[in-house]
Amino acid sequence: GGAPRPAESKAPPSYIANDAHVHLTNYIQEGIDARKLLEVMGTKVGRAALFGIPLQQMWSYRVNGNNAPTYYLESDAPLYYYSYTDAHIALQYKALTKEQQARFDPMITGFNPADMYAADHVRRVLEQFPDTFVGIGEFSLHKEFVTSKVATDPPGIDDPALDRLLRFTGEVGLVALVHCDIDTPFPKPGEAPAYLDPLEDLFLRHPDTTFIWAHIGLGRVVRPVKDQTMYIEALLDNPKLKHVNFDISWTETAKYLVSSPAAIDRVAELITRHPDRFLYGTDEVAPKTQADYLRIFEMYQPLWAKLPPDVAEQVKKGNYARIFDEARRKVRAWQEQNRVRKQVLGVRTQ
């Protein structure tokens, strides 16, 4: 009997997942605020990587007249990089209480990966908003119908600008969440996936950067390639690629992964052999209700049921916590060193 002790009543809720991939805003920089996202997460989702979308759909009167496009497929006008997104995310985060902030891991996205100055942008954002960001992305290298619409040079996997950015990312300890389709939307039969080998080379060139490959390279039209599980397993088995992780976010990805009992078995076996390398995410854009937000979690029920319970927990929550906690620690340490170094230089130049 008696009333419960206060400590017991404050036990943390038993969240069902962390979300490695959710967008606060859409392609015209509209959406919800961080407080609304917390409300939608409720007692179901513990933590989430917090980012907008780095590209803005231009509203060209010449192309669309008064019909304002709200999505990139609604206009032939180009997309352009929208750097203010980083300040927007930082200000959203800074307006929260410490307790609320602990549930978010903000990401820097407002850079052009084809620009040699991209690394400088990331450095400036880290210095402008200390104790905020823990990663970069989601940013796109090859994305069906998106990267071809970018107003400047399209990004490329073997671009020195990208190498410069990822070297800096590794030095700071930021997580890099990258979208790169495994293949072109309409591949020639019998040819190897167009972007798999170049992407593997990129991962190998940056052993100090923790990568999350979004959607395992799948898309709206980019279907799983023949032997996709085998290709992914080869990456997972390579001891030089232990810094590469895979998110299974997006309903389009889930559609393929749970498309048949055989597919579910294959995916479950692969994840069970590599339980520390996969992360759950929603890839929802400005979700308004918890039901919308968790529809992908429900889509994955057949997969959760197939995985050993401890493995399912790692994919839903554990791997996120480990990867993002480590990033928080590293980035804060880098920021502290940077602050001290600037102070010393300041003293010297006075």
Image (cartoon, rainbow, N blue to C red):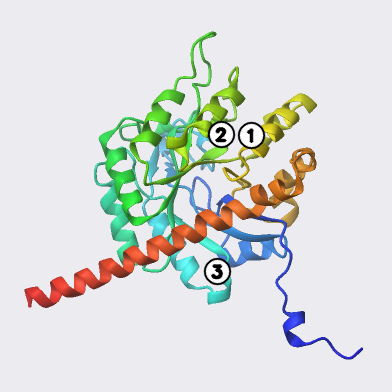
Per the image, the residue denoted by label 2 is 216
Q: Which of 24 and 320 is in front in this view?
A: 320
Looking at the image, residue 270 sits to the left or right of residue 264; the answer is left
* Earlier-in-chain disc, 2 versus 3: 3
In the rendered image, residue 278, in percent from the top left (x then y), is placed at 59, 43
Location of the C terminus (image quadrant): bottom left
In the rendered image, residue 190, in percent from the top left (x then y), is placed at 53, 8
- Tell me the SS state at disc 1: helix
- Tell me the SS state at disc 3: loop
Dot 1: within a 10 Å radius of its alpha carbon, few (fewer than 14), some, or many (20 or more) residues? many
Dot 3: within a 10 Å radius of its alpha carbon, few (fewer than 14), some, or many (20 or more) residues? few
In the rendered image, residue 84, in percent from the top left (x then y), is placed at 38, 56
In the rendered image, residue 23, in percent from the top left (x then y), is placed at 55, 51
Per the image, the residue denoted by label 3 is 102
Which of the 4 image quadrants contains residue 61?
Answer: top left
Q: Cα distance, mark 1 to mark 3?
A: 28 Å
* Earlier-in-chain disc, 2 versus 1: 2
Kind of residue sitting beneath label 2: Ile
Per the image, the residue denoted by label 1 is 253
Q: Nearer the viewer, residue 67 or 12?
A: 12
Location of the N terminus (image quadrant): bottom right
Q: Nearer the viewer, residue 62 or 242?
A: 242
- Tell me the SS state at disc 2: helix
